[in-house]
Structures are given as structure tokens and as C-alpha cells.
Amino acid sequence: MRVSVFGAGYVGLVTAACFADVGNHVVCVDVDSEKITLLNQGIVPMHEPGMENLLVTNLNTGRLQFTTDPAVAVQHGEVLFIAVGTPPDEDGSADLQYVLQVAHVIGQLMTETKCVVNKSTVPVGTATAVKNTILRALNERGLDYPVDVVSNPEFLKEGAAIADFMRPDRIVLGTDSPEAIEVMRELYAPFNRNRDRLIVMSVASAELTKYAANAILATKISFMNEMANLADSVGADIEQVRLGIGSDPRIGFDFLYAGCGYGGSCFPKDVKALRHTFQAFGGEAKILQAVENVNQQQHHRLFDKIKKFYGEDLTGRCFALWGLAFKPNTDDMREAPSRTLLSLLWAAGARVQAYDPKAMSEARRIYGQRADFKLCDSPHAALDKADALIIMTEWKVFRSPDFSAIKNQLKQAVIFDGRNLYDPKRMKARGFRYFGIGRGESLV
Ligand code: UDX
């Protein structure tokens, strides 16, 4: 099939490359000419495992092309995907200007009927707005093709996006057009083997499904973080509680990890945007408000422990920080808990020596040169003469470190662990003061 994808960001790029990889001819278009130049050279402008390989392979076969010219994309695709950003507006609602701009351009350039599919995360009602925008632009040209706008939300996780696309749990399609369902069924057939993963529903239901999925995951995390804080007070261990409740299949083990709070480009933004949708319809999202509040507090939780341990003034203190990315296997630092912690540490007068396997250039880009911030080449270099080690991302490489080397390099054997990587009893036996999240240490 001939497919065009508008937007060469994270979602657009993965979508374009995966569709090309199963034999489709894909054109991916973006307004950012620098990005398009890089992609045409086989360079991926972000870190995503497997992406570069997929890109280069499909560029070489000629099945994947990148352009800045929307006319090429509109002309090429039988199916046109919209996968541009929906950043939060000043008030937290999703900003639809990029989605609607693409819709307008499609309407200006279309010369035959097309199946338009929205993959961007958008509030309920957007598919209708996209359809109306296309129809208006067509009308201005005196044209009147039938236009189907399908809602097809993505459920990709950064760091596992290609696997998520290639082997989806479900493929949600919001449409009431039998023709569009047929086209989409054919397009997704290579990813829909063994059992039917296609769930067809109304457009509004598909749009809401995306937000509801992210919101319930964020809710699980905030719930566990709240329990973890109670566990600290009552001397319980949240890891044991996690195992105890997760073994109930109605609850399950996934997304029950307490820690320093969720971050990234999706959960914070989508929870906010969903709250706005409630407000727009005269309601109030009481649970989501609580989820957000707990998460904001959780970003401060480790710092509160640090302050309790050392006192308010951290002048002259130096901390080793392992992990800057909002989660492992990505260089993404958007809304990362490490950012809140860094500002709090700096405001209290501390210096930080940090290491992250992938997010070092991103950290350099965000913070530039600062006297109180040193980016180190290895986890161990970051420890050098630091007062304590702080862990903010659960990268694999941090899971079984050389504890005696850590002890030798730190001024004192103290670890503040925002990801609960180690066993508190063993850490005590190794001679560490070890503070996790909800591991029974009532420091706060
Ligand atoms: C998420 C959704 O998982 C994905 O389906 C959607 O398409 C986009 O948003 P992503 O933001 O890439 O994906 O990361 P995810 O792995 O879901 O983690 C989000 C945040 O939650 C991270 O900060 C992570 O550290 C945190 N988290 C996750 C926890 O604190 N505890 C957990 O148990 C799980």
C-alpha cells in the first residue's frame, strides 16, 4: 500500500519505518528541514533501540522516503497518517494547531478521496474537527470529495516503540466507515496475526481510549507512590506489598513500581489534557487531579529525604547522580524527575556529578555549562568524593554495581534510591545507609 505520514517525530517516525518494513511504500513529511536531511542520511535524531537499523534498511530498499514537501506526501498516500505533536497549551489543554494545519494542507492539496488517519493524541472531537477542516479547504477549491477520518491512537512506549508497533496488544480504530475499516484491516494485517487485535469502535470512544489508557497507568503509579509514602511511615516495605497485591490477577504486577514519580512526554501531558476535557464539558476530574498532585509531590520526595538527612542547607555538599532520563533506554528528559531534583539540589547550594548512559547530550543541551554541574564519563567517575549517591533512573547498568568501589569513592556510604533498585537488608549488611521510596525508612 502507499502510505504517507505527517510528522517525523517519535510516533511518526516509528509508524513510517514499521509500515515500510512490512513492504509498504511510505513517504514521511515534516516541516523541519534539518530533521529531514538527517533522516535521509540514515541518522535518527533521538535514541530509540533498533530505530537506526530499521531506518537505514528501509531507506536502502527505497520503500521509505522523507520530504518537506506536503504535496508529495498527499499525492503519494492512499492512507494519510497525521502524527504531529499536540503540546500542552498554557492552560494544559492539548494544542491542536499542528494537527489542524496538516488537515488544512491535506484539504488544499487532495486531488482524489483519501483515508485520513489521526495518530496524534488528541481530545475527543478532534477527528470531526480534522474532517471539517479538510472539507472546508476542499470547498474553497470548489471540490467535494468524501473524507473519512479514522482515529487510530498509538500505544508506543519509548525505548520499546518498535516492538510495541510490530507486536501490538491491540489496534484501536475509531470509525463508522466500512471502507475505512477494510483499508485499515489490510494495512495492519502484518501486525495482526495469531489473533485479531483490531478493536473497532466509534471515533469518540477511540479518542477517549488513548487518554483513559495513559490515565489509568498514571493512576496506578500515583496510587503506589502514595502507598509507598505510608509504608515509610509505618515501617512496611512497598516492594513486598507490590508482590502481595500484584499476585491477584485482577490487579497484576505491571506499573506498580513506586519511585520518584512518572515523567516523560505522555503521562504528565495526557493527564492534564484529560482534566481539561472534563472541564470543557462542565465536569471535574477528581481522581486525575489527585494523581497529578501525588506525582508532583513525588518528584520532591527524595529531596525531602536528603534534606532530612543533611539539613536545609546543602552548601558545600556534592552528590553523585545516576540517571537523568525519565526512564531507561531513552535520552528523553522531558518532565524527568531528575530535573526537579537537580533544581532543588542547586537551590539548596549543592553540586552534582551526574552520569546517564544516553541522556548526557540532552542534559548538556538543557543546562549548558554550570559550575555546580559536572557530567561524568562513567557511573564510577560520578561518585568521586561525593557525599552520597542518588539514583533517579533504573538503567540496567546500575542494578548490580560494585558496592565496595562505591563505598571507597563516596565520602560516606549513603545512597538515596528513587527507583528501589537494591534490597535494604543487604545494603545494611554491606554497611550502607540506604534510603529508597517506601522501603520502611521513616526519614520524611
Ligand atoms: C507511556 C505509555 O506506557 C504508552 O503506552 C503511551 O503510548 C505513551 O506513554 P512512556 O511515556 O514511553 O509510555 O513510558 P512508560 O514506560 O509508560 O513510563 C512512564 C513513566 O512512568 C516513567 O517516568 C516511568 O519511570 C514511570 N513508571 C512506570 C513508574 O514510576 N512506575 C511504574 O511502575 C511504571
Image (tube, helix red, strand yellow):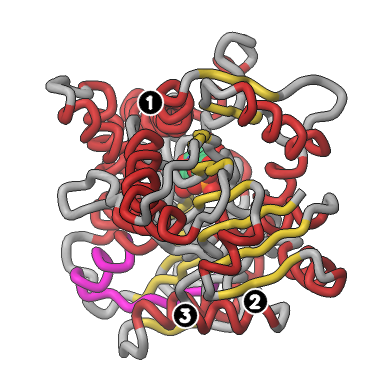
Instruction: Please give the name of the residue rendered at 35% of the width and 58% of the height, measured from the top-left corner.
Output: 101
Q: Residue at x 82, y 70 (%)?
A: 62
Position of residue 150 measured from the top left corner of the image (x, y, whole percent): 52, 34
Q: Secondary structure at mark 3?
A: loop
Q: Reply above or below: 102 against 359.
A: above
User: In this orientation, does residue 395 appear?
Assistant: no
Q: Which mark is residue 385?
A: 3
Whichever of callouts 1 and 3 sits on the residue coming sooner in the sequence is: 1
What residue lies at 61% left-to-right and 61% top-to-bottom?
75
Give the x, y percent position of residue 164.
69, 42
Residue 334 position (above or below residue 15)? below
Counting other residues with Cα less than 10 Å from the Cα at mark 2, is it few (<14), some (14-19), or many (20 or more)?
many
The residue under label 2 is 39
Q: Secondary structure at mark 2?
A: helix
Q: Mark 1 = which residue?
A: 223
From the viewer's side, name the closer residue of 146 and 359: 146
